[in-house]
Image (cartoon, coloured by chain):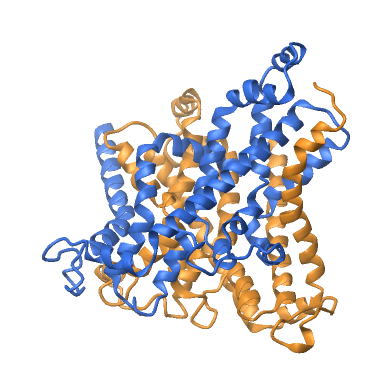
Chain colours: A orange, B blue
């Protein structure tokens, strides 16, 4: 171990400087800023005025914000279980050797390589009313509902879920796949000899062995669902009437459309609280399971 | 029995693969149609002949070459600086004991808990305050310090036997020689993971570049594509839109096909993020 009084501080300084300037100080700024009314388009509030919890109170009385919270809840509640089950299922199918496996893996994984905005423009095209492939495919199965998914208040959110699902399922599959590949063959064989087969083998033997991956994939999917709103910009712009706006998109609208800095700070605080609650409880669960 | 299960698995995988590949294949087919043949039910895939007209038109409507250059500069700048700052910090945390080292390390790690995307509003005003709005350094600056890179490099530095560094120190090796000649050459897989994860994250990043730029001369590919989709004269010209999407997407895709193994490994190990 080397000893030196000043050098280590100098080495750490650049990283610390950038982390402080763009993560730590902004955190404080947001916390303080959320307590002030500060709106660039209202002369009285062009300079911040202290309002305590006022921004939060008005957020929770704002039907738009409540709608956005509900949207985000539905989006997460549908997308994440769907992603977990499908990516695990895919990993099972794609594990092991067989003819064409490299191609099949590539087919599952390739949307990861595209930027989310490209994925969204592709889906915008698929979802076109009339000759869009999506409606044609559904029609084969007897679907006779509304054609314009992106413009329909009941379906716009689902067009976002669809896009995010296609984009992410192969990426998450990769972690399950590497988990499955690391399982000791002899454990599975022993369980099989003991008469465990099919679903029971999966539930009792394999799932516990890949618990770490499951926890990890859940975390990645959850945080990703909150920090990616690129498809909202491309497909729906939050509409019709905010029925497909997600929290981070709403944050952007608050700041750059309504020019409400105080309100956008309050939304930031809420997003950070949700994420921290999730990561911390996730961490606690994993710690307990390790013991 | 076994053979049947295998056949069924092959069939299921073939169907799922076809489903997964359809969106991109369809967009590619649409981009190669002659623009004068209208889309209609039944002839979506098949047109009279292949044509690059959509690509020519897309390239004439928006400066995609410039967007590429901007993305390159932005991503290159971020990765270059990140590798430098993270190597220095990781070396300090792995090789030195100093007062407050645990606290400083924890403070840096906090960055991994809070996605930078959420801190859009304060970072926007910081960049404006620094006079860097609508510049490439303005897009890149918030990412110059990376907790993830520091963490990953420190881990791989710690896995080196300490005697190695101590011997070098006794031989009169300066700290920077030790870092360059002993530590970094032994951390190549971590370095590769950092480069790949940073590359794919910042190449694809959209929201931050969108808010911090306003002119074509600095706008990266992602923001350029979205602006293209919203241009008035584009409307529902799907061939044109698909061509623009392909222009933005295919080169990175080709790169992926060449370096598939490294990419996948990089993704898995960068998963700690």
Residue B252 visible in this rendered orientation of the protein:
yes
A88 or B157: nearer the viewer: B157
The residue lying at 50 percent from left, 60 percent from top is: A79
Q: Is residue A47 left or right of residue B66?
A: right
**What percent of the width, then of the height, locates residue A25?**
78, 58
Give the total of numbered labels: 0
Residue A165 visible in this rendered orientation of the protein:
no
Q: Quadrant of the N terminus of chain A?
A: top right
The answer to which image quadrant residue B62 occupies is: bottom left
The residue lying at 46 percent from left, 45 percent from top is: A173
Q: Is residue A93 left or right of residue B94?
A: left
**What percent of the width, then of the height, locates residue B263?**
45, 39
B188 or A225: nearer the viewer: B188
The residue lying at 46 percent from left, 25 percent from top is: A185
**What percent of the width, then of the height, locates residue A134?**
31, 68
**What percent of the width, then of the height, locates residue B19?**
30, 55
Q: Is residue B61 left or right of residue B159?
A: left
Residue pushed farthest left? B48
The residue lying at 30 percent from left, 41 percent from top is: A103
Relative to A42, say whether B9 is above or below.
above
Relative to B158, say whether A76 is above or below.
below
Residue pushed farthest bottom? A43
Q: Quadrant of the C terminus of chain A?
A: top right
């Amino acid at each position: 171990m080397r000893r030196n009084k000043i050098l280590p501080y100098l080495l750490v300084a650049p990283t610390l400087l950038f982390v402080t300037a763009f993560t730590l100080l902004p955190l404080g700024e947001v916390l303080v800023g959320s307590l002030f009314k500060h709106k660039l388009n209202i002369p009285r509030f062009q300079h911040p005025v202290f309002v305590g919890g006022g921004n939060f109170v008005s957020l929770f009385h704002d039907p738009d914000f409540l709608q956005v919270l509900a949207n985000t809840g539905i989006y997460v509640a549908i997308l994440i279980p769907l992603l977990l089950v499908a990516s695990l299922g895919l990993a099972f199918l794609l594990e092991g050797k067989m003819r064409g496996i490299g191609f099949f893996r590539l087919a599952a994984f390739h949307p990861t390589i595209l930027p989310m905005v490209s994925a969204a423009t592709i889906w915008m095209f698929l979802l076109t009313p009339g000759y869009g492939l999506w409606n044609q495919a559904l029609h084969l199965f007897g679907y006779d509902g509304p054609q314009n998914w992106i413009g329909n208040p009941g379906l716009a959110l689902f067009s976002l879920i669809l896009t995010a699902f296609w984009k992410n399922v192969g990426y998450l599959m990769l972690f399950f796949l590497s988990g499955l590949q690391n399982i000791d063959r002899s454990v599975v064989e022993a369980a099989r000899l003991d008469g465990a087969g099919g679903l029971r083998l999966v539930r009792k033997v394999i799932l516990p062995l890949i618990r770490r991956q499951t926890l990890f994939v859940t975390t990645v999917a959850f945080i990703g669902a909150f920090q990616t709103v690129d498809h909202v910009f491309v497909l729906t712009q939050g509409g019709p009437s905010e029925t497909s706006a997600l929290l981070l998109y709403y944050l952007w609208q608050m700041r750059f459309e309504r020019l409400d800095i105080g309100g956008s700070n309050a939304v930031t605080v809420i997003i950070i609280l949700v994420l921290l609650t999730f990561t911390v409880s996730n961490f606690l669960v994993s710690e307990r399971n390790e013991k | 029995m076994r053979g049947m299960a295998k056949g069924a698995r092959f069939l299921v995988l073939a169907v799922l693969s076809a489903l997964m590949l359809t969106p991109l294949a369809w967009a590619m087919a649409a981009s190669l149609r002659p623009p004068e043949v209208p889309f209609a039910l039944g002839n979506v895939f098949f047109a009279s002949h292949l044509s690059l007209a959509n690509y020519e038109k897309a390239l004439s409507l928006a400066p995609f070459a410039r967007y590429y250059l901007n993305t390159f500069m932005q991503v290159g700048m971020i990765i270059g600086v990140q590798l430098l700052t993270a190597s220095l910090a990781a070396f300090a945390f792995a090789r030195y004991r100093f007062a407050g080292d645990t606290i400083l390390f924890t403070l840096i790690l906090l960055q991994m808990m809070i996605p930078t995307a959420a801190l859009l509003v304060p970072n926007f005003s910081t960049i404006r305050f620094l006079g860097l709005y609508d510049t490439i350094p303005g897009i890149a600056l918030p990412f110059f310090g990376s907790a993830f890179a520091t963490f990953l490099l420190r881990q791989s530095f710690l896995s080196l036997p300490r005697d190695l560094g101590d011997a070098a120190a006794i031989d009169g090796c300066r700290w920077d020689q030790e870092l360059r000649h002993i530590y970094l050459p032994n951390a190549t897989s971590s370095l590769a993971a950092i480069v790949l994860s940073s590359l794919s994250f910042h190449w694809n990043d959209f929201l931050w570049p969108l808010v911090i730029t306003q002119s074509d001369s600095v706008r990266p590919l992602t923001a350029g594509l979205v602006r293209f989709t919203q241009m008035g004269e584009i409307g529902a010209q799907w061939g044109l839109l698909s061509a623009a999407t392909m222009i933005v997407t295919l080169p990175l895709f080709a790169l992926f096909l060449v370096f598939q193994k490294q990419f996948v490994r990089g993704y898995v190990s960068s998963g700690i993020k």
